[in-house]
Image (cartoon, rainbow, N blue to C red):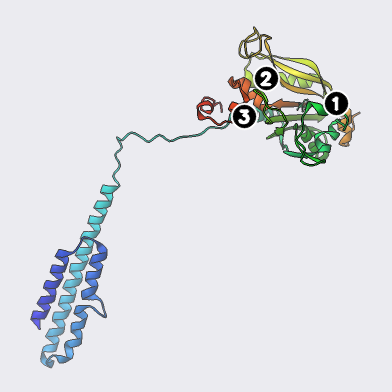
Amino acid sequence: MNDRLAGIKQEILNGIDQLAASRAAAFELRKQFLDSKTGKIGQLMKEMKNIAPEERAAFGKNINELKDWAQQKFSELDEKLKARELERRYESEKIDVTMPARETETGNLHPVTQIRNQLMDIFVGMGFEVAETREIENDYYNFEALNIPKDHPARDMQDTFYLSPEYLLATQTSGAQIHTMEKKKPPIKIVAAPGKVFRSDDDATHSPMFHQMEGLVVDERITMCDLKGMLELFAKKIFGEDTTTRLRPSYFPFTEPSVEVDVSCFSCGGKGCRLCKGTGWIELLGAGIVNRRVLENCGIDSEKYSGLAFGIGLDRAAMLKYGINNVKLLFESDLRVLRQINDN
Ligand code: DAH
């Protein structure tokens, strides 16, 4: 019987020797000997009944010793394999800190988004709240309430995409003025974005979809001076301290009087260059004193309150500021172009 025990011992040692160095294989091997039901050592216990009574105690002791020995062996083996596995993992995860880094591509904001963020920052800094514009308007908000009746020639200024006789793609952000004044009573001081607008227009400086930002201030005694002062401050902030503005008379149905605002050319400083077509001035936005009719359409007392409004073309502002000569470049997402413009 002792031979059998020695045989099992040898079997275990041989098994360990030949073992592929994996913990799973070691576990299987351990099971062959130590599994409580099927293990070879456990099986020996069942033979107890065949042993002469006087030898049983010694037999049991021997089996228990073998069991302890085997358990010890297997746990040593497991420790060893564990350590080897860890070593192998460290080896495979080793990082060579001297290797050149892989370049990671980072994006930056679209030039129009950059301009929009800058404008928002400036106006929020002046105490404006931010409202949202809509991409789909109905005739009332886009035209009628802004004092552009159906037969008004000003409708021809804006080639409209109609979705139905009633609904259309917003041709301007000015509808935000009406939405605001319907919800809020003076004092009002808002800029509205993101400002996607649509017109059937397509050439080097016009695209059928472009962006505007609308501004509206309504309070007691708002005058052209407020408008001029505010825009002057704004122009300096966005194009530089040396920038000045000039107002030219213009016409918009929703403002009276209306102006077009030029800024001194920030490329040549006013001397005349290609950017300003030799005039020294660059046209930047439309603005004016809110037409009384528009206030009244929104239930605001035009005897007590007056307002100023302005609308800025963001794509145009981005093209001017970053020297982009074709509006298509803003839509192509060519990284060679976009990478050059990181201004935020
Ligand atoms: N909505 C005008 C346009 O799209 C721009 C504009 C002009 C907006 C004068 C205004 C304004 O608020 O007062 O051409």
Give percent across and percent down for residue 68.
18, 74
Circle 2 SS class: helix
Disc 3 + disc 1, Cβ < 8 Å: no
Q: Residue at x 27, y 65 (%)?
A: 24
Q: Is residue 55 visible?
A: yes
Q: Earlier in the sequence, mark 2 or mark 1?
A: 1
Residue 112: numbered disc: 3
Give percent across and percent down for residue 192.
72, 34
Sort mark 2 into few (<14), some (14-19) or many (20+) by Cα contacts within 10 Å. Answer: many
Residue 235: numbered disc: 2
Q: Earlier in the sequence, mark 3 or mark 1?
A: 3
Give percent across and percent down for residue 86.
26, 54
**In which quadrant is the C terminus drawn?**
top right
Residue placed under numbered mark 1 in the picture: 153
Q: Residue furthest right?
A: 303
**Residue 281, image quadrant:** top right
Cα separation, mark 3 vs mark 1, equals 31 Å
Q: Disc 1 residue type?
A: Pro
Q: Residue at x 20, y 62 (%)?
A: 20
Q: How many tags in the picture?
A: 3
Circle 1 SS class: helix
Q: Earlier in the sequence, mark 3 or mark 2?
A: 3
Circle 3 SS class: helix
Cα separation, mark 2 vs mark 1, equals 31 Å
Cα separation, mark 3 vs mark 2, equals 17 Å
